[in-house]
Image: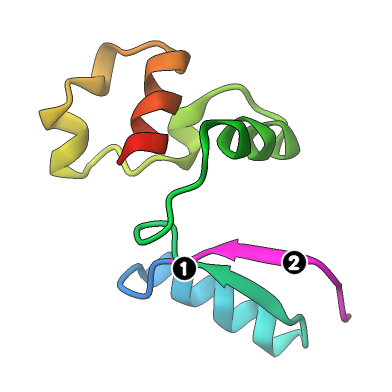
Amino acid sequence: MAESNVTIWFNPRCSKCRGADELLVAHGVAAQKVRYLDDPPSRAEIVRVLGLLGTDEPRTMMRTGEPLYRELGLADANADALIDAMAQH
């Protein structure tokens, strides 16, 4: 199963990212890795990916257990504020 134009937002310290990469490799799917911590996606790109995922809930792409999530007070934030925080951090 070789797919073209596959991109994975990748953090080498994240076990889920590494697992996804291993799964793609096992199935022969070459993927471009974007290290999102070094090169954060734009707000527009985040919104685009949310659409591809079929959701408008940014928390589905967030690590809500991380200290920064708490430090920024995002627990009660609306979707726009969450997307802004993702693009900024």
Which residue occupies 38% across, 17% down? 81
Amino acid under disc 1: Cys
* Secondary structure of residue under mark 2: strand
Q: Earlier in the sequence, mark 2 or mark 1?
A: 2
Mark 2 vs mark 1, CA separation in Å: 14 Å
Q: Position of residue 84 (x, y in %)?
A: 40, 25
Which x, y percent locates residue 47? 61, 30
The boundaries of the magenta stretch are: 1-10
- Magenta-colored segment: predominant secondary structure: loop
Q: Residues within 10 Å of mark 1 (few under 14, many from 20)?
A: some
Q: Is residue 51 left or right of residue 19?
A: right
Q: Is residue 19 left or right of residue 52?
A: left
Mark 1 lies on residue: 17
Displayed quadrant of residue 73: top left
Q: Which mark is residue 6?
A: 2
> In the image, what residue type sits under mark 2?
Val
